[in-house]
């Protein structure tokens, strides 16, 4: 019993430090080890990779041209990737398209009407119906894949005229060089037509994989984020916001922590503000607040209480830089084509992906008040010029253009 308790404590500590995905991998590796009674069937686990074609051959007239099936992974409330999917679906619906949302897994007793209500209440209000499994959804003229796993389903599905791929990040980089890296990378060679989140992805997929692509840009929720003055700041210290999420290695937790530690060693009037994950399993040698996973309603005030934000990304950047700038928080970011398709040196303080370079960038904002205020004003102006409405209409126009060019 004591051994079981110890094992549970170790597992919980590992979960808090590394996240569910890494804990799952740890357990998975244990299960498939020779010590395990139950052995892993790799062929079954990855059976979707080599799935036989299914459905009947497309023939003209099976579905109206304004019908689209979107095949998505299952989701949790708060998923930013799914919010973007539902956001663009809403613009398609407003333009007269009839949408079905297809969750790419068997139904394990979930009520699809309740699931639709979850989408409408927590993401975007949609007319689309929800189905589990593409074989259970109505036939549609076009079908969208939205992740590398769903791309295999769409590839094998025959009962559709056109196949599209909404790509929000370069998913092979979610893995080390491995089978899964190859599985994800291969989906860009399926011959789908791509609409990507940002120019970096569109350029990369068209240049390296010959994929027909166009892209939409980013904006932010203007009803939520604004640069309202916060007068109840609890400290006179400079507050640096840092998105810290250990289960997401591409957000460079360790690099950011080392740079922040350097800054705090050199300035005693600095406080770091963490959000994104429970960091109670970590220790830090500087003043900090750790807010864990923060609700959307709490984020604006938290952002505005900070003097600057450190945002690092080794794949496609998130919406966070725009949200921070819109909240009046100047941003320090790493450089790279994956970032600079949106950000530039006039609105953002760039640094190389190096501890000392990031340290210098943060210290410059701390020490040069005029520069900080100038970057803040330019960031607000840049963010305010973006619009989800413009990007949504662009998405519809891209889709219409691809259809006409078939």
Image: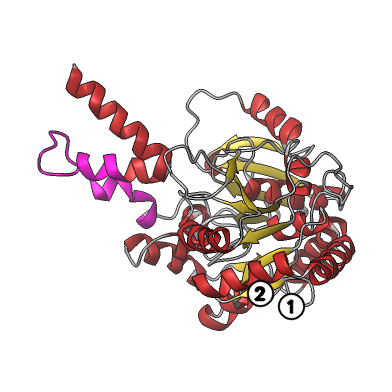
* Side of 181 relative to 88 (left or right): left
* Residue 350: image tag: 2
Q: Residue 319 location in percent, x, y?
A: 70, 57
* Side of 2 relative to 383 (left or right): left
Residue 207, placed above or below residue 3: below
The image's colouring method is: secondary structure
Mark 2 burial class by Cα count in 10 Å: few <14, some 14-19, many 20+? many
- If you read the primary sequence from the N terminus, does the residue marked by circle 1 or circle 2 appear first? 1
Query: How far is mark 1 from mark 2, CA to CA?
Result: 6 Å
Front in this rendered view, residue 174 or 128 = 174
Secondary element under disc 2, as helix, strand or loop, is: strand
* Residue 211: image tag: none
Magenta stretch contains residue 43: yes
* Residue 345: image tag: 1
Q: Which residues are magenta?
A: 26-50
Secondary element under disc 1, as helix, strand or loop, is: loop
Residue 280, placed above or below residue 81: above
- Image quadrant holding the N terminus, namely top left
Magenta stretch contains residue 211: no
* Side of 96 relative to 5 (left or right): right
Res 38 → quadrant: top left
Mark 1 burial class by Cα count in 10 Å: few <14, some 14-19, many 20+? few
Q: Residue 63 location in percent, x, y?
A: 70, 50
For the question of whether residue 353 can be seen, the reply is: no
Tag 1–tag 2 contact (CB < 8 Å): yes
Q: Residue 404 location in percent, x, y?
A: 78, 71
């Amino acid at each position: 019993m004591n051994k079981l308790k110890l094992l549970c404590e170790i597992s919980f500590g590992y979960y808090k430090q590394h996240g569910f995905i890494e804990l799952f991998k740890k357990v998975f590796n244990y299960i498939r080890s020779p010590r395990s009674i139950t052995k892993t069937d790799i062929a079954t686990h990855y059976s979707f990779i080599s799935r036989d074609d299914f459905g009947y051959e497309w023939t003209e007239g099976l579905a109206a041209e304004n019908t689209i099936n979107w095949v998505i992974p299952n989701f949790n409330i708060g998923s930013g990737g799914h919010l973007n999917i539902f956001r663009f679906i809403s613009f398609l619906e407003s333009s007269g398209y009839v949408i079905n949302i297809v969750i790419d897994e068997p139904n394990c007793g979930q009520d699809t009407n309740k699931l639709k209500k979850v989408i409408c209440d927590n993401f975007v209000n949609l007319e689309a119906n929800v189905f589990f499994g593409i074989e259970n959804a109505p036939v549609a003229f076009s079908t969208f894949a939205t992740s590398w796993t769903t791309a295999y389903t769409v590839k094998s599905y025959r009962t559709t005229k056109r196949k599209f791929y909404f790509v929000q990040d370069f998913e092979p980089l979610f893995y080390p060089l491995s089978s899964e890296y190859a599985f994800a990378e291969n989906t860009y060679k399926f011959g789908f037509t791509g609409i990507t989140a940002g120019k970096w992805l569109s350029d990369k997929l068209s240049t390296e994989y010959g994929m027909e692509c166009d892209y939409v840009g980013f904006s932010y929720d203007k009803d939520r984020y604004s640069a309202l003055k916060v007068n109840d700041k609890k400290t006179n210290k400079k507050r640096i916001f840092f998105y810290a999420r250990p289960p997401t290695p591409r957000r460079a937790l360790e690099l950011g922590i080392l740079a922040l530690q350097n800054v705090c060693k050199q300035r005693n009037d600095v406080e770091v503000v963490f959000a994104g994950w429970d960091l109670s399993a970590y220790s830090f040698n500087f003043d900090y607040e750790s807010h864990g996973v923060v609700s959307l309603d709490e984020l604006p005030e938290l952002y505005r209480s900070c003097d600057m934000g450190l945002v690092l990304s080794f794949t496609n950047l998130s919406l966070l830089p725009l949200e921070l700038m819109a909240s009046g928080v100047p941003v320090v970011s790493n450089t790279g084509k994956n970032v600079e398709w949106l950000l530039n040196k006039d609105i953002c303080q760039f640094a190389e992906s190096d501890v000392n370079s990031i340290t210098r960038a943060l210290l410059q904002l701390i020490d040069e008040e005029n520069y900080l205020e100038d970057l803040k004003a330019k960031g607000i102006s840049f963010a305010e010029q973006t619009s989800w409405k413009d990007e949504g209409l662009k998405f519809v126009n891209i889709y219409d253009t691809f259809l006409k060019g078939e």
